[in-house]
Image: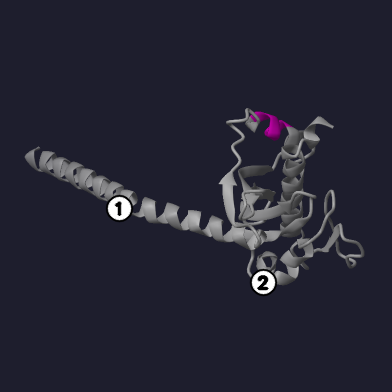
Amino acid sequence: MNTILKNTISITVITLVAGLALGVVQDITAGPIAAQAEKSKEEAYKTVFENAAAFSEYSLDDKGQAEDLVGYLNDNGFSAQTIDEIMVAEDASGETLGYAFTITDSEGYGGDIQFAMGVQNDGTLNGISILSISETAGLGMKATTDDFKNQFKDKNVEKFTYTKTGASSDDEIDAISGATITTNAMTNGVNAGLCAFRYVEGGAES
C-alpha cells in the first residue's frame, strides 16, 4: 500500500513539475512568436503598399462596424473569409492612400490561408503578400510564387474569377494547375478583401 501511495505521489509531483515547466516555456516563447508575427505583417503591408510612409489601425470596433462588416461579407457570399485587421496606409503628410487588409480564408486544401493585400483609394489592388499557407508542395504552394500573385497586381476590378483556359481580361486569373481548391480559396479571399474595401469606403450603403 505504501509503495502504491509513494508511486502515486511521485507521478503527481512529476506531472505538476512538467506542467509548470511547459507553462514557463510557453510564457518565454509567446512574446518572441507574437513579435515575429507582427513583424511579418508589417513587412507584408509594406510589400503591398510600397509608397506608404506609415500605417495606422482602422478600428471597426471603435466605429461600431465589426458586426456590420461580417454581415456584409456574408451577404456577398464570403462566409468563409475573415478580415483580421484593417490598416490605413498614409503618405508622409498623413494623407490616406488606401487600406491594407489582413485576410484569412478557411477554404484552403491544407487549412487556413492568411495574406495581406493593399487597395488604393480608387479601388486599385496593389498586390498580395501571403503570411501563412500550408498547401501541397509543388501544387497549391505555387500560390506563393510571383507568377501567381502578380496576376492580382495593379488591377482595378470589382471581383476576380479564375479560368483554366487562359486569362483574357483584367478580372481573370489563371488557375494553378492541379490546385483548383487553392486557386478558389485565394480568389475568394482577394474578393472578400475588395468587398471589405467597398464597405470601408461606404459602398455598403449603396
* Residue 121 appears in the rendering: yes
- Residue drawn at x 63%, y 51% as measured from the top left: 90
- Identify the image quadrant of the C terminus: top right
| Residue 3 screen position, x and y as percent | 9, 43
| Residue 85 screen position, x and y as percent | 60, 44
| 48 lies above or below 56 | below
Provide the secondary structure element on which disc 1 rests: helix
- Residue drawn at x 62%, y 30% as measured from the top left: 63
Name the residue that disc number 1 marks. 25
Q: Residue furthest left?
A: 2
- Residue drawn at x 90%, y 66% as measured from the top left: 165
- Residue drawn at x 77%, y 35% as measured from the top left: 202
77 in the magenta segment: no
* Residue 134 appears in the rendering: no
Name the residue that disc number 2 marks. 138
Q: Is residue 157 left or right of residue 116?
A: right
- Viewer-nearest residue: 94 or 142: 94
Q: Which mark is residue 142?
A: none
Residue type at mark 2 is Gly
Cα–Cα gap, marks 2 and 1: 35 Å
What range is drawn magenta here?
67-71
Q: Is residue 148 left or right of residue 17?
A: right
Residue type at mark 1 is Val
- Identify the image quadrant of the N terminus: top left
